[in-house]
Image (cartoon, helix red, strand yellow):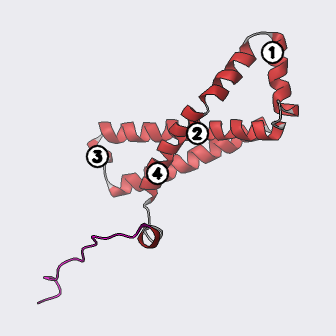
Amino acid sequence: MTELAKKRPEFRNINAFNDLPAYRWPLASIVSGMHRISGIMMFALMPFIIWMFDTSVTSEYSFARFKAAFNSGLWFFPGWFIKLVALALIWAYLHHLIAGLRHLWMDVSHAAVSKAFGLKSAQFTLIASILLTLALGAKLFGLY
């Protein structure tokens, strides 16, 4: 039997502990998974989002309380922890938005469904969401 005629190996019993950690995920699949994770984060933190919106627009007193929560804390949560949660929400929103636009573009344009476009758009999605998160995080933590 020649080299070309050999059958590819079949893996029927995959051991999740041995086989999955060695699997190399393509960048496009990592970005797609992070798109789902960011959507879950935004959904799970919806009560915090609603509290932030309600507290910031109800009155001048509630807005002052809102600002104080980010500086000195709220209940037993310190201010830095609330800022980190807000930063995670900022990342989740930005990543979900950019990755969603990426997925919409791939749905609309058939030329965009290729390995090269998947890699380039995944790189752009990661870099843009991280850079925008860093810029807004710097504002959140008072660096400018």
Q: Quadrant of the C terminus?
A: top right
Mark 2 vs mark 1: give the one in front: 1
Q: Earlier in the sequence, mark 4 or mark 3?
A: 3
Q: Which range of residues does the magenta coloring cover?
A: 1-16
- x then y, percent, for residue 69: 82, 28
Which residue is identified by label 4? 122
Q: CA distance from mark 4 to mark 2?
A: 15 Å
Q: Secondary structure at mark 4?
A: helix
Mark 3 vs mark 2: give the one in front: 2
Dividing the picture into quarters, in which one does residue 49 lie? Answer: top right
Which residue is identified by label 2? 92
How many marks on residues?
Answer: 4
Residue type pointed to by label 1: Ser
Residue type pointed to by label 3: Ala
Residue type pointed to by label 4: Ala
Q: Is residue 76 left or right of residue 119?
A: right
Q: CA distance from mark 4 to mark 1?
A: 40 Å
